[in-house]
Image: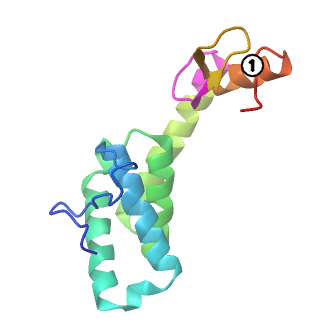
Amino acid sequence: MRQRREDGSLKEADPRLSQESLQYKIMLAADVMISLLECNKDEEQEAAELIMGLVTFIENNIDNINNSLALAKAAYAMKLFEIDSESTAQIITKLKEFMKRDKLSKSKKSSGHFVYTVVPSKKSSTETILPMDKWKASIREGQVDNRK
């Protein structure tokens, strides 16, 4: 509760995990909100105030969310909090648009909005950054050492 910022977002207490991006702040806010709501902590005054601040923070930043994972977490948190709110509907609509765009991009073999991974290479001591689908293919072909 002491980690709240003025805008309603939370400050990560562990500097090793701290990321100052808006997408990370939204995911952290949604994760904390989900935890409090699933544990029925919303009945306690301090937790209820925190949840309201997190709801406000997420609502104020809906237009700035550009990450599918942040959208999904925000949608779930808002759905747990308030089943039929306009903000929840807006987040879900935006998430569906992302899904359509990603499917279209994937069908065109674009490297659009996909998950990437860093993997060690068998052929050299350096690491390679690959799109997830290419990484899976390289494992099947035996080009990547996946034992680490």
Q: At 56% across and 38% down in the image, what residue appears?
A: 99
Where in the figure is residue 62, as x and y percent of width and height?
A: 32, 50
Q: At 72% across and 8% down in the image, what residue appears?
A: 123
Q: At 24% across and 56% down in the image, what residue appears?
A: 60
Is residue 87 positioned above or below 103 on the image? Answer: below
Q: Identify the residue under disc 1.
A: 144
Q: Amino acid at mark 1?
A: Val
Type of colouring: rainbow
In the rendered structure, the answer to whether residue 72 lies left or right of residue 5 reads right
Magenta range is 104-118
Q: Is residue 126 magenta?
A: no
The single residue placed furthest to the left in the displayed view is: 6
Q: Which image quadrant is residue 116 in?
A: top right
In the rendered structure, the answer to whether residue 102 lies left or right of residue 9 reads right
Placement of the C terminus among the 4 image quadrants: top right
Where in the figure is residue 33, as x and y percent of width and height?
A: 41, 70
